[in-house]
Amino acid sequence: MKKLLPLLAACLVLALSSFVFLRPTAEAGYQVGDKAADFKLKNVDGKLMSLADNKAAKGYIVVFTCNTCPFAQDYEQRVIDLNTKYASQGYPVVAINPNDAATVPGDSFAEMQKRAKEKKYAFPYLHDETQQVARQFGATRTPHLYVLTRQGNSFVVSYIGAIDDNSEDAKLVKTKYLENAMADIMVGKPAAVSSTKAIGCTIKWKKA
């Protein structure tokens, strides 16, 4: 028994260290129904932006995305189209790049500026340099979407997840998750399907 105690202790330490190592980098983040904290992030035009800036907004379609992820690139035109469709109805897109530029140079602020200009983004493209906002939201992928709905001076999370069910080809989409959710949200109803699995590249977190 005495010989077993050191072995058991060693196993316990190994198990605990493994748990710490495998713990997700992102925090649990928001759930549907939670109030989203406001933030201030730098837009590609060099100005700081917050949710409170747009007094006319009924809500926002917040998408965590980036330049380099193939999934984000496949969904890029669909994000542009979402802004075209919903911004005029009070729900503009706000794109946020949370990737660590030291890990992925193609996601640097300068490259974000180039991408936004090249693709003629009509929506903010914000740099989450500290990754704090991505952690607050609980974003894990690019793209990862959150629909926020205004309630008084607050914004409440109404949908979390994917745009649709086909990341590779918009022509093969069978279910438009986000648009279905928006149809409910915009008439004051909870989204029938308020959460789906985000499909994309993992966010590139800063190394500890």
Image: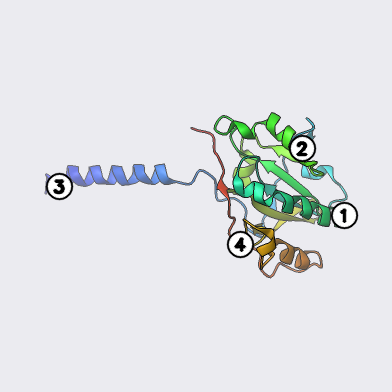
Nearer to us of marks 3 and 1 is: 1
| Amino acid of disc 2 | Glu
To which residue does mark 2 refer? 118
Q: Earlier in the sequence, mark 4 or mark 1?
A: 1
SS type, badge 1: helix
- Give the image location of residue 1, x and y in percent: 11, 49
Label 4 to label 1, Cα distance in Å?
A: 25 Å
- Pointer 3: what residue? 4
Q: CA distance from mark 3 to mark 2?
A: 65 Å
Q: Earlier in the sequence, mark 3 or mark 4?
A: 3
Q: Residue at 12% across / 45% down in the picture? A: 2
Bin the neighbour count of mark 1 within 10 Å (Cα to Cα): few under 14, some 14-19, many 20 and up.
few
Kind of residue sitting beneath label 1? Ser
Considering the numbered disc 3 on the image, is that residue within a helix, a strand or a loop?
helix
Which one is nearer the viewer's eye here, 177 or 77?
A: 77
Can you tell which mark lies on residue 88? 1
Where residue 167 sits, quadrant-wise, is bottom right
Q: Return the x and y of residue 36 as percentages of the image width and height.
A: 69, 50
Q: Is residue 105 above or below residue 24?
A: above
Task: State the separation of the CA atoms marked 3 and 1.
Answer: 69 Å
| Contact (Cβ within 8 Å) of mark 3 with mark 2 | no
N-terminal of the pair, mark 4 or mark 2, is 2
> What is the distance, in whole Å, between disc 4 and disc 2 at their CAs?
31 Å
Lower sequence index among marks 2 and 1: 1
